[in-house]
Image (spheres, rainbow, N blue to C red):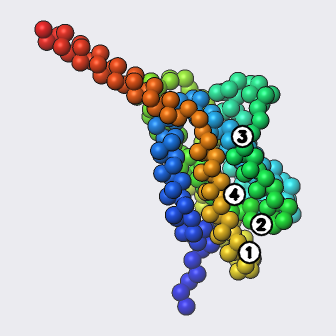
């Protein structure tokens, strides 16, 4: 009999198509604009609410398997708060209220916690693995843009949420997979199937939030204009020195 596929891999396979859509959405709507602090901060603000809810749920559900994901170095609430203070100021939370897409996301999490809390494992697995994988790539792209492109800022800071030092990213990912696989072994087939279905909903809700990020088109247009102006100036200088 063939060895059963680890449940964490089953979760990845079940979300392969919707994950590809999510990646395309991020690349199309956010990747180029990630060098813009306003857009970056808006994205942080949205996902801050989700990560904060999950981390508070881990505490509330201290007598359930969900609490096992409170791994040393993994929790991100304080890191989000640090980055938001960096971009929006220390008083960023005083007049803030979540967008409708964020509120709907939180309502879904609340309903799951009330009725079937083990399904939160789908959100914990995909969101933290995403931050440890794709989040690292976005952060590096942003750092590259800030350092080398004309419109990049040189101010250091604002990257706490993707900085897991001194903890190993590879180790954290391995621990998340192991926790997920071990917990899944204790669940019946019905709950496991529900987790696979809920995994797809994770990306649907993520995509709904990302689509509401504003000003990305304006950012792209502004930076395209800057690049075109720079090219025009370069051509003028080349023409000047040739004459």
Quarter of the picture holding the C terminus: top left
Determine if residue 160 is in view. Answer: no
Q: Earlier in the sequence, mark 3 or mark 2?
A: 3
Query: Element at badge 4?
Result: helix
Q: Residue at x 72, y 63 (%)?
A: 121
Whole-number angstrom distance, CA of label 4 to CA of label 2: 10 Å
Q: Earlier in the sequence, mark 3 or mark 1?
A: 3
Q: Residue at x 75, y 46 (%)?
A: 103
Q: Residue at x 77, y 56 (%)?
A: 109
Per the rendering, the mark at residue 118 is 2
Whole-number angstrom distance, CA of label 1 to CA of label 4: 16 Å
Per the rendering, the mark at residue 191 is 1
Query: Element at badge 1?
Result: helix
Query: Element at badge 2?
Result: helix
Specify few, some or many for label 3: CA neighbours under 10 Å numbering under 14, 14-19, or 20 or more. Answer: some
Query: Element at badge 3?
Result: loop
Disc 2 vs disc 1: Cβ atoms closer than 8 Å? yes
Report the mark closest to the observer, 1 or 4. Answer: 1
Per the rendering, the mark at residue 167 is none
Q: Residue at x 54, y 53 (%)?
A: 22
Q: Position of residue 216 (x, y in %)?
A: 53, 35
Disc 3 vs disc 2: Cβ atoms closer than 8 Å? no
Q: Is residue 99 above or below residue 181?
A: above
Q: Is residue 105 above or below residue 65?
A: above
Per the rendering, the mark at residue 124 is 4
Whole-number angstrom distance, CA of label 4 to CA of label 3: 21 Å
Residue bearing mark 3: 99
Whole-number angstrom distance, CA of label 2 to CA of label 1: 8 Å
Q: Position of residue 224 (x, y in %)?
A: 40, 28
Whole-number angstrom distance, CA of label 3 to CA of label 1: 31 Å
């Amino acid at each position: 009999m063939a060895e059963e596929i680890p449940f964490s891999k089953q979760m990845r396979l079940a979300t392969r198509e919707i994950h590809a859509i999510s990646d395309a959405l991020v690349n199309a709507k956010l990747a180029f604009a990630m060098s813009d602090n306003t857009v970056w901060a808006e994205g942080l603000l949205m996902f801050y609410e989700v990560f904060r809810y999950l981390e508070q749920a881990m505490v509330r559900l201290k007598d359930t398997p969900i609490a096992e994901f409170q791994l040393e170095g993994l929790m991100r609430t304080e890191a989000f708060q640090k980055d938001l203070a960096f971009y929006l100021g220390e008083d960023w939370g005083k007049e803030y209220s979540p967008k409708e897409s964020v509120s709907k996301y939180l309502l879904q999490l609340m309903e799951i916690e009330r009725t079937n809390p083990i399904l939160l494992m789908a959100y914990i697995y995909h969101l933290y693995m995403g931050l440890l994988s794709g989040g690292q790539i976005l952060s590096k792209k942003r750092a590259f843009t800030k350092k080398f492109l004309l419109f990049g800022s040189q101010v250091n800071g604002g990257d706490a949420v993707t900085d897991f030092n001194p903890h190993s990213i590879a180790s954290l990912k391995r621990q998340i997979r192991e926790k997920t696989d071990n917990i899944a072994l204790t669940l019946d087939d019905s709950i496991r199937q529900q987790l696979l279905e809920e995994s797809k909903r994770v990306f649907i809700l993520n995509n709904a939030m990302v689509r509401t990020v504003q000003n990305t088109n304006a950012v792209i247009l502004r930076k395209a204009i800057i690049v075109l102006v720079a090219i025009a100036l370069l051509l003028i200088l080349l023409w000047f020195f040739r004459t």
